[in-house]
Amino acid sequence: MAAVFFVARPFLGRGGEEPTVEPAPERLALEEERDRALAALKELEFDHRTGKVSDDDYRAMVGELRRSAADALKALDAGTPRADVRGPQ
Amino acid sequence: MPELGRAALIVCFGLAVYSVVAGFWGAHTRRRRLSRSAQNALVAAFACTLVASLVLFIALARSDFSFTYVAQHTSRELPTPYKLASFWGGQEGSLLFWLLVLTGYSTAAVLLDRKAGRELVVWVVPVLGVVAAFFSMLVVFVASPFHTQLASLDGAGLNSSLQSPYFQIHPPLLYLGYVGLTVPFAFAMGALLSGRTDERWIVATRRWTLAAWMFLGIGQLLGAKWAYEEVGWGGYYAWDPVENAALMPWLAATAFLHSVMVQEKKGMLKVWNMLLVMLAFSLSLFGTFLTRSGVLNSIHSFTEGSIGPWFLGFICFVVASSLALLFYRLPILRSKTKLESLVSREATFLYNNLLLVALCLTILWGVTFPILSEAVKGESVTVGRPYYDFFLRAFGLPLLLLMGIGPLIAWRRASLSSLKRVFLWPTAFALTVGIGLIFAGAGSSTPGLIAYTFSAFVAATIVLEFARGTAARRSLSGEPVPQAFVSLIGRNRRRYGGYVVHAAIVLLAIGIAGSSAYNTSRSARLAPGDSLKVRDYTLTYRGLTSSRSSNAIETRATIDVSRGGKQIAVMHPGKNDYPIEQQVSNEVSIRSDWLTGEDLFLITEQVNGNGTIDFKAIINPLVNMIWLAGLVFLLGSVITLWPDAREERRLAIRYGRLAPEH
């Protein structure tokens, strides 16, 4: 009986189906790209500081990574929808 | 009471089926209440399994022999801890235990995770439900632990080789590992079903995968220790199919844990990661199938048994449906980024993956070939140690080397000048160690020497990583060395926890190489007063003693151990005779030298009627490195698992479970 009640509980409340609010896929992809670029920059800085990456390699890679991060930030600021609101079918 | 257990499992089965049907329909039609109801059904299934498990535990503790399962696996004289541990000692109980752990993991995964979005979880629930429905179907209709009989006066007892403290911990840990791999699989399928192939499924399951992998690793090491102490042949891993059944999913999970880092950092290997998580889960099911279906005894016992065909059918269903789903979603899984250089950290992760998967599939072939040969040609064949040892060396030694190479190379690409600089000291150290070992006599085994040399290289790499990282941290923060060391690890738990785990693998490699390539063994028949010399040990047999425990007659040989003319120990290898089970077990005696890591391992192989014994002595150099590796592995895993509150919050905001901060 307890199991039946617990399973039926979501139907016992008042009101209709609430829509699901999820981050929009396009925005999520950009956020992931931004986070990836920022994490790569942070990792490059650390590898350079610990001597794993030479000064020449650092100079060659840091520009590319900064550009990727800047591009992702610009695209995010350009106003892709933040949320994806989906109701029941 | 058995009726309560049976009823609980029937309700559990009904709830699992409901969670599948309601879950899939609710996810497909975006009916949030129906999805929530399906999730509640999965949680309620856990509660029912808990009730059924308590019923069985109580029956075992009370020696209620009206339960057929209790009568078949325990006896009145069996000590209580073993009575309770018999829960997972037999087929029916172990399947119930699988179901308990599965529904427990499922409940925790869908309720606790803040990083997985609702749109993913609604698909994860029915996938978990499918697995729960299968196992609950087995324990309700095929292999019920609640069959009853006329209560007998006593039970059949527990197999003597299971009467060890390890029996209480090794199977539960393995099950926490096997079953835990269901969670990342369900999230991966949820990602494919929902069409949301962003990183959330990986981020949500990272800790679950790590935990399952940790439990599987520790469980296997404990199993090896158990075999070493209990089985009494002087070794710890026999490449037995049951042992391999746990190793294969662990290798696949190890590959997965590495390659997800590439997906997180570079957005690559999405399809490969899906395949790996499917492989790991399928192998965990396959491992359960191998150990529970009777197929390992003989193909005939498999076909006559009850659960084998069901398991095989379910494995085929899982593999076919997950591959079909992956194929359907291939277009949205294609990565935009490519591998920039074959000399980069992501490339070494790829090589590492290929070697791990190759080793895993090689072991899988070794396990399945005898089964297939008997099924197809009616011929019984054995795939022995030389096959496995060959491939362990062929794939394992390069893997060991890669463990040292990977951390030294930067992401994206590395120039020749960078490589020369970072490789110099570890290579010099390794070569020095290798040459020194040749002069010390370790050249008698080429694979052993290579393993030691590679281990030295990896150890040097790990030490340098910690040293350079601490120095870098100090230069940023001005902290004193100990504080900088701790903050370094605290801020980079995955990386440095991973290095600690690598250190554990180095210890494991040293222990395995030492004990397998450089061990010494002597056998003799000894009468009281006779001595046997093994290397620098002199072993003198004094005589036999006999005593009685609650359920066994214990016979022990007294052996004086001396070295350099001085007595250093008295050891007692012998036999235990279990009258109820009608079995005799080897009770070995082990003396560990913690300074050298070496074991003196004594076995009384036979007690003869005239007071003589057939006696064997083995010296296993460095074998204790293996058990030390287990502790270091646990430490490394805990560091990697330790939650980072800032990171958790950032990911929860990204995936919509928390409102963004302003």
Image (cartoon, coloured by chain):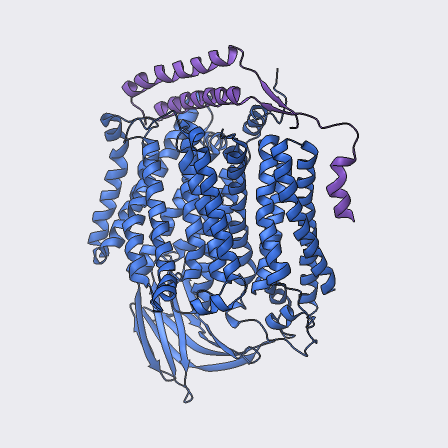
Chain colours: A purple, B blue
Q: Nearer the viewer, residue B327 or B634?
A: B327
- On screen, residue B379 above or below B208: below
| x, y percent for residue B566 | 36, 70
Locate the C terminus of chain B and report the quarter of the image it occupies. Answer: top right
- On screen, residue A16 versus residue B632, left or right, reads right
- On screen, residue B430 above or below B10: above
The residue lying furthest to the front in this view is A89
Q: What number of labels is visible?
A: 0
Residue in view at x 44 percent, y 23 percent: A36
| x, y percent for residue B155 | 63, 75
Q: Nearer the viewer, residue B444 or B109?
A: B109
- On screen, residue B539 above or below A83: below
Q: Nearer the viewer, residue B635 or B10?
A: B10
Locate the N terminus of chain B and report the quarter of the image it occupies. Answer: bottom right
Residue in view at x 47 percent, y 51 percent: B316
Residue in view at x 58 percent, y 58 percent: B95
- On screen, residue B334 versus residue B124, left or right, reads left
Image quarter for residue B603?
Answer: bottom left
The residue lying furthest to the bottom in this view is B610
Q: In this view of the protein, can residue B433 be seen by the observer?
A: yes
Q: In this view of the protein, can residue B89 be seen by the observer?
A: no
Image quarter for residue B534?
Answer: bottom left
| x, y percent for residue B35 | 66, 36
| x, y percent for residue B313 | 50, 55
Residue in view at x 24 percent, y 55 percent: B442
